[in-house]
């Protein structure tokens, strides 16, 4: 089907090749997940498949790519288009027509098919992606997932035997992601279309693939069937690739299994009679009572574990009544007879980090605009810093409210990153501009890029520049509109860590429940213009009904925890609960905060021993040893 | 003998000196009296007229004659000259004439007065008396006004006062040309206008319904139809002379007759089109009193050939460019990669989103607020943004045709979104595309070895192109939309909006383009 | 508030106007534009304007569109009235207001003798504004009753090269996205304390600040879009086929024939009349034609 031999490619104007001797063979009907860190060359590889490289791009190309036996270098675009369809990250950057029908018909029209045939192909393709009811609709009126399915359909209409996709769900909301992935799976299973999916969200997509291929530095360094790919996690950890939570969970527990989905994980656990053999919850600290204390301890002990419960009281000397935003029965919208927000009541206090979740169109962005006083409520009141926004100029809070938009690229217009950071303070006539700029750039770790043109930085650097440009004005509240969309996790975490460490007051919209759990002190779930849930992450995430309304699903680990009847919100937490030695340690540490490290280690060792003896499953012992080591080192750090 | 006597008789008759012929006063002289001058037969006058009586005497007698002429006016008439004139005529066909001014007092009672002239001719000591008499009717103003009428008025007419169907009635065409065009016409020998002034004629038909012969003076004025003030542009000074000294006609109307006279009408270049009142005035000779006036509304059409030709040329240029593109579209489009086409399209969208849409309302609003100076404000957005886009696009894709495609997308997008498939947008956009393409190619900004990054060159070229298209668009507004713009306004517009703002836009467009180039890499 | 959307978006209905073939609409629009610039008789111009407006009734336009139309027309006609009130250069003209005295320093000289509002100019502006108003209204009617892709099909049907049509489709498709982006860009800057209204801070700076992020985004988007389009065999063949086939109905044919015939006739008559008034060409046989032109056109 696809046969790549010793493929080298260097982009025009560059000296370093992007692809360095790639060899890959993909059989008919396979579903291959190609992953790797940013800049590894996976997107470039994709472009070579339908001849865009080298036919359109120029550059230095050597080696051979055969698609269905056809050498791409020697064949024309039309032949290749029939054989292989390409789908990219952002559907908005692929759809150029105004209607669904036109978009899908575009390929067949270019292939000079007869009118009746085009009509048939369009219908079939739309049916394959479950979009046949949307044929006459405007492409602008579709949701993200629908748009991406239209992109797939527009490729399918050309009857390719292979679909190559470049991060097709990275910009989708959870509903869109599900729609697209289900569609792709159906295409692969039922129609036997070969799928080559490039994606860095390995942990979410691994369960769909037959085979996992990892690229790094322009080479393929890993190529395994999905079922065996996670036997050894070293390579994934080294490249910063997140493995599926069930796999991580099993590996941590020392179970020799790589379940890619919750169902598989549960099957594994069942096979090992894990639930029955598990200690009754009474032996563990009661999660209902002690969750907060426990999680505070975790936050001290580890980065990367959910600490949505680190309540504002713990964030410094902040009074309980220090309210920044006070919204009472607020109705707001863009047209009088179509209110987007319907009766919002909300109070946000200084130091809180509020995640706003919900499907697209639930009113998240409108809420943010109201918080920034850029949109005035139709009814009710919005008080920002105690002032009613109705009587204020939309931009009168400039400097006090910082807004990072969904697309940070739109925030960059200066000649250098430093100028971006200086822009706000200069406009607002602040003092010590230089220091503000330097501090904010430093906070986002881009001080070394300060002279670079912001627009030509990488995606993550652009996000950080945009955030730095807001930080330099030192706003009292920061609003982030879906900062996670299309961004690598490293960038998001770095940014969010900063906010957390600085106790910034933060309101952010996100689809990423894990990010919300990790960084928010409070989660709001919105649906159809109303807040349907408002509470600590752990409370919200437990309510499956609420999540369903917002098209959110529980993280796999929470599902597993639910199944096991325990309260856990991350792999680490679940593992700790299931291997209580570690949690004992934490408790000890919290209770005796002045206990010297050696004592803690001792007690930990003792505790582990105690627990070890209690744990019947021999396999668990291995993992426990590993875990204790990890915990030891962390405790020592403390 | 008898024969000899007869011979001598004949010889004597033949050689004898001519014996003095007998003087016959009526046969051997012509003596004429016209009151007033020019009127044969009975004259007509109105009280308060300064008239002249005309005396004419001619001799057909071979010898000397001394003549004493005496003019006799009825009581009440005031003679401004001596009533007695003496002169002598020496030979045959010698004549004498004299105009004798007199005044008919305003208060003289109307009626017919006899005026006689008596000539006493002394020939060889003999005196002969010849008398001539005429009657002057002194009529009341009402009476005269009823007798003389302007029975026809033809504007424009030919030199004889006759109307010509090939010209629309009561319509004057003001042919106005730009100095440049005039030069061009001179060079090409295609002179549309002979002079700086357009001239035509007015035909006036006068009827005398009375039984007196009336000498009249006909003049006219072209008046502002509202204020009835004379409009100078229609009575320009010609070679330093007041047009009033040229624009009149005199005619003597016989009883019961009609006469057609023509009057020249001069139109200076600065004349404005519009509605005017042509007022023809008929005065009795010798009187300032206007006996008859006749008003006629006339329309002056201002034909500015400059804008017409510019509109025509721009349209043709636009159409030619479009047809050229259509006929060789494949060849032209193949020079652009797909991503070039997409980029041009997106630039078109940005120009539409950032310029056209806000301008749809802003333009008119600022007109409402800033009036004629709104271009200073709107141009800041329109020109600077637009040329920033154009210059940066050229930096990104320095190929011939890129500006045309961009303009085409803008035109079609405007048509699709706001329905502005208008002649004005077509002409201005196509003209500026053509000019920009040609100049950029000529300056080496686009082409084989493109060098788009010289800010000054780009600024000047964009400035020139925008000035050209700006001027053309004013011409189109004037010609196709019949709108008026002052010259100063057009000049200010094309210099500030057309050049200055454009130059600034293009200048900074280069930096923008360079930044975008880095993004593209 | 009348936003970009009410200007730009078509309404989907099934009326006689909506059903017209886009090619027919384009041809009718072009014909009408010719007629509109040809006419001089105020009554006929007003009649033409009314005919165009009746199209809005036939198309059963919603109130928001009518409101938008009214606003645009009022602004357009007012703009014309205002400019003509100042620049009217026909006689008679009556000064009703002096804006700039001829003796005003510098500006009096610059404006070549002051600036006045003329009563007759107001009237002239109102009449001449009808010309642009008819063209604008019909253009908007066409846009508001036709989906942009139908319009493009119409253009392709009128032999506009597909590559050009493709560019326009792309431009139309990205318009709402780019408008949102431009609005966001302005918002971002204002939230960072920038006030674009402040002239001191420089219009150039504002323009660059708006264009830089917007265009950078476009440049980035271009790469993906071009690849996506190429991978669907765009321009791989010299020709292409089309899913949609446009069909001229009998009514369309009749409409187009009438409009084109009317346009050609009116333009020809006026041309002959203008040649006659300019003394370029006259023949007595055409006197009835001149009479029509003078009386009605």
Image: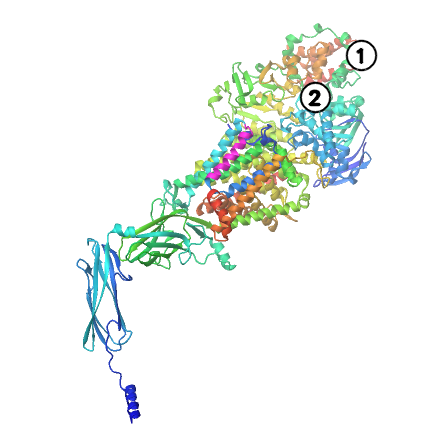
Residue indicated by mark 1? A271
Magenta stretch, main secondary structure class = helix
Q: Residue furthest bottom?
A: B1
Q: Is residue B323 part of the magenta span, yes or no?
A: no
Residue indicated by mark 2? A178
Residue B391 left/right relative to B254 = right
Where, by quadrant of the figure, is residue A66 drawn? top right
Can you give x and y, in whole percent of width and height, for residue B265 in the image? Answer: 39, 55
Q: Is residue C50 part of the magenta span, yes or no?
A: yes
Residue B164 left/right relative to B229 = right
Can you give x and y, in whole percent of width and height, for residue A188 in the image? Answer: 77, 25
**In the displayed structure, would residue B96 be above or below residue B411?**
below
Mark 2 vs mark 1, CA separation in Å: 28 Å
**In the displayed structure, would residue C55 be above or below residue B273?**
above
Choose the circle earlier in sequence order: 2 or 1. Answer: 2
Where, by quadrant of the figure, is residue A40 drawn? top right
Please give the range of residues in magenta.
Answer: C43-61
């Amino acid at each position: 089907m696809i046969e790549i031999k010793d493929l080298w490619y260097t982009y025009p104007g560059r000296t370093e090749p992007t692809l360095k001797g790639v060899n890959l063979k993909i059989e008919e009907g396979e579903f291959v997940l190609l992953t790797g860190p940013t800049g590894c060359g996976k997107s470039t590889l994709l472009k070579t498949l339908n001849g865009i490289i080298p036919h359109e791009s120029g550059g230095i190309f050597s080696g051979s790519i055969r698609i269905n036996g056809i050498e791409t270098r020697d064949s024309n675009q039309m032949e290749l288009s029939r054989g292989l369809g390409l789908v990219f990250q952002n559907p908005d950057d692929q759809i150029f027509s105004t209607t669904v029908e036109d978009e899908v018909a575009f390929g067949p029209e270019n292939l000079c098919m007869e009118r009746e045939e085009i009509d048939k192909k369009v219908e079939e393709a739309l049916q394959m992606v479950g979009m046949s009811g949307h044929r006459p609709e405007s492409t602008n009126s579709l949701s993200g997932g629908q748009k991406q399915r239209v992109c797939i359909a527009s490729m399918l209409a050309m009857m390719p035997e292979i679909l190559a996709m470049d991060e097709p769900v990275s910009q989708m909301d959870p509903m869109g992601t599900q729609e697209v992935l289900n569609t792709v799976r159906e295409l692969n299973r039922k129609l036997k279309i070969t799928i080559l999916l490039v994606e860095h969200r390995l942990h979410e997509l691994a369960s769909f693939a037959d085979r996992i291929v990892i690229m790094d530095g322009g080479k393929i360094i890993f190529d395994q069937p999905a079922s065996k790919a996670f036997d050894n996690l070293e390579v994934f950890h080294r490249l910063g690739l997140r493995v599926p939570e069930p796999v991580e969970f099993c590996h941590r527990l020392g179970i020799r299994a790589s379940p890619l989905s919750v169902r598989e994980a549960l099957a594994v656990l069942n096979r090992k009679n894990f639930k029955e053999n598990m200690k009754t919850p009474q032996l563990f600290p009661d999660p209902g009572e002690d969750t907060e204390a426990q999680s505070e301890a975790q936050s001290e002990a580890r980065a990367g574990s959910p600490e949505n419960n680190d309540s504002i009281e713990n964030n410094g000397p902040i009074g309980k009544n220090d309210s920044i935003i006070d919204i009472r029965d607020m109705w707001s919208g863009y047209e009088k007879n179509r209110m987007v927000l319907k009766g919002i009541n909300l109070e946000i206090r200084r130091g809180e980090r509020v995640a706003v979740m919900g499907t697209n169109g639930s009113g998240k962005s409108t809420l943010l605009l109201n918080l920034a006083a850029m949109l005035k409520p139709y009814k009710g009141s919005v008080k920002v810093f105690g002032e009613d926004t109705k009587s204020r100029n939309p931009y009168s809070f400039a400097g006090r409210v910082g807004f990072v938009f969904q697309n940070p690229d739109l925030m960059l217009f200066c000649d250098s990153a430093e100028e971006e950071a200086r822009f706000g303070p200069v406009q607002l006539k602040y003092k010590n501009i230089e220091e503000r700029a330097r501090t904010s750039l430093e906070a986002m770790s881009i001080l070394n890029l300060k002279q670079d043109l912001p627009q030509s930085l990488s995606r993550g650097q652009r996000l950080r520049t945009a955030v730095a440009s807001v930080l330099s004005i030192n706003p009292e509240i920061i609003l982030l509109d879906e900062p996670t969309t299309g961004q690598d996790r490293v960038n998001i975490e770095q940014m969010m860590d900063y906010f957390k460490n600085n106790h910034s007051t933060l309101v952010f919209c996100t689809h990423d429940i894990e990010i919300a759990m990790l960084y928010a002190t409070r989660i709001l779930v919105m649906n159809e213009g109303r807040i349907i849930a408002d509470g600590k992450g752990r409370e919200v995430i437990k309510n499956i009904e609420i999540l369903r309304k917002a098209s959110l699903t529980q993280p796999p680990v929470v599902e597993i925890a639910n199944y096991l009847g325990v309260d856990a919100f991350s792999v680490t937490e679940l593992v700790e609960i299931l291997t209580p030695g570690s949690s004992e340690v934490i408790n000890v540490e919290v209770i005796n905060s002045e206990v010297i490290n050696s004592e803690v280690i001792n007690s930990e060792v003792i505790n582990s021993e105690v627990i070890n003896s209690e744990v019947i499953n021999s396999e668990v012992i291995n993992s426990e040893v590993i875990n204790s080591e990890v915990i030891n080192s962390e405790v020592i750090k403390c | 003998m008898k024969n000899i006597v007869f011979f001598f008789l004949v010889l004597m008759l033949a050689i004898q000196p001519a014996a003095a012929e007998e003087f016959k006063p009526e046969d051997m002289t012509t003596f004429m009296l016209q009151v007033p001058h020019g009127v044969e037969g009975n004259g007509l006058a109105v009280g308060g007229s300064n008239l002249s009586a005309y005396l004419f005497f001619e001799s057909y007698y071979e010898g000397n004659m001394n003549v004493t002429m005496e003019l006799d006016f009825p009581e009440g008439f005031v003679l401004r000259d001596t009533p007695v004139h003496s002169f002598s005529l020496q030979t045959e066909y010698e004549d004498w004439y004299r105009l004798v001014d007199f005044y008919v007092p305003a208060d003289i009672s109307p009626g017919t007065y006899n005026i006689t002239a008596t000539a006493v001719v002394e020939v060889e000591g003999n005196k002969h008396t010849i008398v001539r008499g005429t009657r002057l009717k002194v009529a009341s103003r009402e009476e005269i006004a009823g007798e003389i009428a302007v029975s026809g008025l033809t504007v424009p007419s030919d030199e004889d006062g006759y109307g010509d169907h090939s010209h629309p009635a009561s319509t004057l065409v003001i042919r106005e040309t730009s100095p440049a065009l005039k030069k061009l016409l001179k060079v090409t020998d295609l002179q549309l206008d002979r002079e700086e002034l357009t001239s035509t004629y007015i035909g006036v038909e006068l009827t005398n319904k009375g039984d007196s012969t009336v000498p009249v003076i006909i003049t006219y004025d072209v008046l502002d139809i509202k204020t009835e003030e004379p409009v100078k542009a229609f009575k320009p000074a010609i070679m330093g002379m007041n047009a009033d000294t040229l624009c009149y006609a005199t005619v003597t109307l016989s009883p019961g007759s009609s006469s057609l006279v023509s009057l020249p009408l001069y139109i200076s270049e600065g004349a404005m089109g519009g509605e005017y009142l042509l007022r023809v005035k008929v005065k009795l000779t010798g009187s300032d009193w206007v006996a008859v006036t006749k008003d006629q509304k006339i329309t002056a059409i201002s034909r500015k050939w400059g804008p017409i030709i510019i509109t025509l040329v721009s349209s043709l240029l636009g159409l030619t460019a479009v047809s050229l593109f259509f006929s060789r579209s494949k060849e032209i489009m193949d020079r652009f990669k797909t991503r070039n086409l997409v980029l041009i399209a997106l630039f078109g969208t940005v120009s539409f989103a950032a310029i056209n849409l806000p301008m749809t309302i802003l333009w008119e609003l600022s007109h409402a607020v800033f009036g004629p100076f709104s271009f200073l404000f709107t141009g800041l957005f329109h020109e600077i943004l637009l040329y920033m886009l154009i210059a940066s696009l050229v930096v990104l894709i320095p190929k011939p045709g890129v500006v045309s495609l961009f303009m085409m997308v803008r035109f079609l997008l405007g048509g699709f979104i706001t329905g502005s498939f208008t002649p004005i947008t077509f002409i201005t956009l196509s003209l500026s595309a053509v000019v920009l393409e040609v100049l950029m190619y000529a300056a080496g900004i686009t082409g084989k070895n493109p060098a788009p990054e010289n800010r000054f060159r780009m600024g000047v070229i964009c400035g020139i192109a925008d000035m050209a298209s700006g001027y053309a668009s004013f011409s189109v507004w004037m010609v196709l939309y019949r709108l008026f713009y002052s010259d100063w306004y057009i000049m200010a517009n094309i210099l500030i909006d057309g050049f200055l703002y454009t130059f600034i836009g293009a200048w900074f467009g280069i930096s923008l383009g360079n930044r975008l180039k880095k993004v593209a890499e | 508030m009348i936003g970009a959307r009410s200007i730009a978006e078509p309404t989907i209905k099934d009326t006689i106007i909506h059903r017209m073939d886009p090619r027919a609409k384009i041809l009718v629009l072009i014909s009408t534009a010719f007629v509109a610039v040809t006419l001089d008789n105020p009554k006929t111009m007003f009649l033409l304007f009314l005919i165009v407006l009746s199209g809005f009734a036939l198309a059963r336009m919603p109130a928001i569109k009518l409101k938008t139309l009214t606003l645009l027309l009022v602004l357009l006609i007012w703009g014309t009235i205002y400019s003509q009130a100042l620049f009217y250069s026909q006689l008679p003209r009556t000064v009703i207001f002096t804006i700039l005295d001829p003796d005003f320093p510098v500006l009096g000289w610059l404006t070549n003798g002051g600036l006045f509002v003329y009563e007759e100019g107001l009237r002239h502006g109102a009449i001449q504004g009808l010309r642009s108003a008819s063209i604008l209204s019909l253009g908007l009617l066409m846009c508001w009753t036709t989906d942009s892709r139908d319009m493009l099909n119409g253009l392709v049907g009128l032999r506009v090269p597909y590559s050009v049509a493709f560019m326009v489709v792309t431009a139309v498709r990205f318009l709402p996205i780019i408008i949102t982006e431009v609005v966001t860009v302005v918002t971002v800057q204002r939230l960072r304390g920038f006030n674009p209204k402040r002239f001191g801070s420089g219009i150039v700076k504002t323009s660059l600040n708006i264009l830089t992020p917007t265009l950078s985004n476009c440049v980035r988007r271009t790469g993906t879009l071009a690849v996506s389009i190429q991978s669907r065999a765009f321009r791989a063949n010299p020709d292409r086929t089309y899913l949609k086939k446009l069909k001229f109905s009998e009514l369309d044919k009749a409409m187009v024939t009438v409009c084109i015939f009317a346009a050609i006739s009116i333009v020809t008559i006026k041309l002959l009349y203008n040649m006659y008034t300019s003394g370029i060409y006259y023949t007595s046989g055409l006197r009835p034609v001149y009479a029509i032109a003078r009386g009605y056109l």
